[in-house]
Amino acid sequence: MASSAIVGAAVLAASPAAAQTLELNAFQFFIVSGGDSDEDSSDRGFAFSTNTEVHVKGEIMADNGITFGFRVEFEADSGETNNVDENSIYAQGSFGKLEFGNNDGAEDTFMVNGSNSGVDYGGVGNPTSNFLDTAFAGNTRTSVDFANGVDSSDGTKITYTTPNFNGFSAGVSYTPDTDDGGDGNSFNAEDSDGIHDHIGIGLGFDGEFNGVGVEIGLVGAFGKADAEPEDDVYGIGGGAAISYAGFTFAVGGIFDDADGNGGEGYAFDAGIGYATGPWSFSVNGIYSEDDDSDDELLAGSANVGYSVAPGVRIFLTGYVGEEDLGAGGTNDIVAVTSGLGVSF
């Protein structure tokens, strides 16, 4: 095997690259958010936050037509302990795409849900980097994505995606252990709390018919828990988005079961968005339930955004929700989020 690898490396080195590119992209959002939650334990109802990333992507096209590349997404916020969000290398050609590294699995990349209508921070489907980080008290899904323990997240994996056939494509991911790559790219062969032998699959369609855009995604995930009770975890989901004349209507749903490693639950969402010139608008709603705890969430959000200049955006989002906590009581949530973003 070692001698074969040396020969293979020599062949690649002897083949000059036909084209090389290196791209640098970055964005930063400054976010102001506040609100009120019955269960929020923070000392005040508002805060400032940032979300900053720097992306580097390089590609080399060999004489045989295969493109080899890498990408790294650096987390650039102050005090960030895990400084890399995703990183991977890949080979792409007429056979499709093979990707190796810490990146989203097929169960993530093929998912379509209500957020496809266009959602900013603080809206249904995007409760991150704002007041909503501390507002929820129950175990329900706050977005239509697989729960931790079912989703492979950025665990180190191999993903294969087929070529696009008349709008159709499919993908499959294999993650030996979802803990690997999550913290300092450590190797956890034993005594792991992650999910091992995780398989993520996705099937998608993206096309247009007489000016009507159609996007459909079906996804699934399966794995085995390392920690007690060492049960199987699994999930299924999917959704669709229809766009026409600036409007986009999107829906999605998921069901997953992480047993003792996250519980059983489901969620549905829907959204409608409209974009015209520099303006964008969206309204979204979600209902979710955690079967183990009987917690429920019903919430909605409205969002307006404006592009001040190419790569410069401001937005305002309002969020209203209620958690029905199975253990007793309710948690009413009201939140407002606004931000300024610059990207290039």
Image (spheres, rainbow, N blue to C red):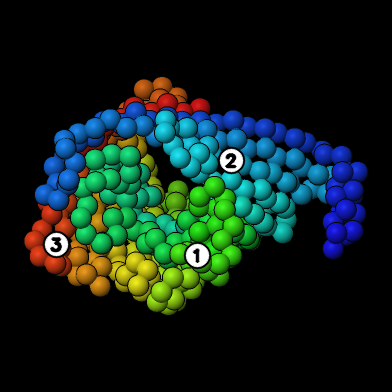
State the residue position of label 2. 72
Q: Secondary structure at mark 2?
A: strand
- Image coordinates for residue 159, horizontal then vertical, percent: 61, 59
Q: Residue at x 55, y 67 (%)?
A: 190
Image vertical order of residue 265 relative to residue 4, above or below: below
Query: How far from the left and from the top, in percent, is residue 208?
Result: 49, 52
Give the Cα distance between marks 2 and 3: 40 Å
Residue at the spot of label 1? 192
Q: In the rendered structure, which amino acid carries the disc numbered 1?
A: Ser
Q: Amino acid at mark 2?
A: Val
Q: Earlier in the sequence, mark 2 or mark 1?
A: 2
Q: Nearer the viewer, mark 1 or mark 3?
A: 1
Earlier residue among tags 2 and 3: 2
Q: Residues within 10 Å of mark 3 (few under 14, many from 20)?
A: many
Which residue corresponds to the image point at 13% horizontal and 42% vertical from the top-left?
Answer: 36
Q: Can the viewer see residue 93?
A: yes
Q: Is residue 234 left or right of residue 161?
A: left
- The vertical placement of 154 against 55, above or below, is below
Q: Residue at x 48, y 71 (%)?
A: 226
The residue singled out by tag 3 in the image is 324
Q: Earlier in the sequence, mark 1 or mark 3?
A: 1
What type is the residue that disc 3 sits on? Answer: Asp
Which one is in front, 117 or 127?
127
